[in-house]
Image (cartoon, rainbow, N blue to C red):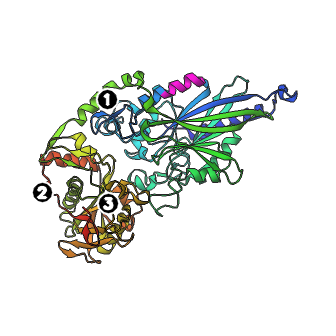
Amino acid sequence: MPLNRRTFLEGSVAAGAGAAALVAGTAPAAQAHGRPPKRYSFTVMGTTDLHGHVFNWDYFTDREFDDKAHNDVGLAKISTLVEQVRKEKGRRNTLLIDAGDTIQGTQLSYYYAKIDPITARRGPVHPMAQAMNAIGYDAAALGNHEFNYGIPVLRKFEEQCDFPLLGANALDAKTLRPAFRPYSMHRLRTPCGRDVRVAVLGLTNPGIALWDKANVQGRMVFPGLEEQAAKWVPKLRSMGADVVIVSAHSGSSGTSSYGDQLPYVENAAALVAEQVPGIDAILVGHAHTEIAEYRVTNKETGKDVVLSEPLKWGQRLTLFGFDLVWEKGRWVVEKVGARVLNSNTVAEDARITRLLTDEHRKVVAYVNQVIGTSTVAMSTAEAAWKDEPIIDLINHVQAETVRAALAGGEHAALPVLSQASCFSRTAGIPAGQVTIKDAAGLYPFENTLEARVLTGAQLKDYLEYSAKYYVRTPAGAPVEPAKLSNAEGTPDYNYDALYGLTYEIDIARAVGSRIVNLSFEGRPVDPAARFVLAVNNYRASGGGAFPHIAGAPQVWANSDEIRNTIIQWVRAKGTVDPGQFASVGWKLTRDGVPVF
């Protein structure tokens, strides 16, 4: 539903000013006579990075979700925890908020964006909106993945939610006014007769400008979190907010995965806490890590700001506990703490599962559609340290797609290479029938495909950067595959294997000098030679901070998800035969001796 921003903002200011004047002029007589001050406690519950999970179900394996830690996922589990907290604390003494990345990540969310889209005339209500409305969310920040399906899908989802989607730093590109609600204000009625006003400020990730450039360029801009928090927090206090909570789709580490591509920090939550006075707590999202409680001292006030990040997909629920005291005619935050609850300790809320049974069944039927056959079984189990046929499949489809798109054009004569990452170490293609869920499991993200031109020298730099993924291991030292990768915290999705070249990665060498025997068609790669690289839009936009790629000339781009491209390729071929596309293009070595 379009927001009348002027009415919302000015109306809030007027109402807040009136409330502040009322509070300021009515100090209770009890305090004046030395009686104990009035106190009030309340709880704010928080989730983040739900990524389309309603049920404790994995649509890529078509069975109940499970991992090594036996975590559970989904809003149905969260709902049970929320109701327990409300029963314990009293519903009027609680709020429930989210920190973004809600409508992308599972085949359930994909189905209602692309297969049976919510934007269609008389289209369905998004399952995440249905579930979150039923649970009773009070507010949610925008995540970067909210923009993956385009602005119309996001706006329709916003319209279907009974709670506001917040993004103070998501601005209209022309007017530089908020494109979404910047904040929400909530009034908690206390037994003391003095309401507590709680402001929730929503901040999203500035990386959206890069990662979803095709969807937002010219329409929205995303300035830094610290800058916008510094603008809005004083306003919220002037409106009479007794408590200010930030819901930030931004990790706490102060780092960025896109290097210096933007002047803003991707994971800025701790910087916001440190630099912007007047914030009591921050619900952190985006980084997919679990932080029960993290305290950051504000430089100006010297007061602690409490941060908490519940684990992704509804695996955890954050509880912020606020203790307030009435002092000098206003509520003052005396104490804040945070902890997380594990959703694997409770059963799914039958009210939520019943609500979405039909939607769940439709998606299960969809992902089990057979699209072809495979001559052998393929797995990603060892793809983090070996060139496996299943990653070659992704690369082959990408390279073939780009080659066909460039045919007959000015770049048709250039060799086409491809990059791919191992997104999941549990994905696989079975021998025999191949279904949509099998193919989709190789590519869980909504990335699209581009073609960029790089030189041989630039490709060498690219591979050297990628090779930092491996832990330096001297020749002759024992090798434990499980401890060989993810050096310096590099995630699997930020390690790229290149297809179409042959090379060795000498893990006994220092970072920056590991790529050996880099060749194309049996000859050393000419540093000046030009190649076309089939690359996903995340990487092409600077995600992962790989060198050269973000500034490389773009010669083609596609709007369809790579996942769909793979599915359609399998449908068209009918049979997946690794003998037709797989080869050992790269391997790990130490002083020239293969590790495996």
Q: Which of 312 and 194 is in front in this view?
A: 312
Residue 272 spot, x, y in % from top left: 60, 51
| Residue 441 relative to residue 20: left or right | left
Q: Is the magenta stretch mostly helix, strand or loop?
A: helix
Amino acid on which the number 3 mark rests in the picture: Val
Furthest-right residue in this view: 33
How much space separates mark 1 and mark 3, taking CA atoms?
A: 44 Å
Determine if the magenta segment contains residue 89.
yes
Q: What stretch is highlighted in magenta?
A: 81-90
Q: Is mark 1 on a helix, strand or loop?
A: helix
Residue 329 spot, x, y in % from top left: 79, 33
How much space separates mark 2 and mark 1, taking CA atoms?
A: 37 Å
Q: Nearer the viewer, residue 411 or 262?
A: 262
* Residue on which disc 1 sits: 360
Name the mark on residue 580: 2
Q: Is mark 3 on a helix, strand or loop?
A: loop
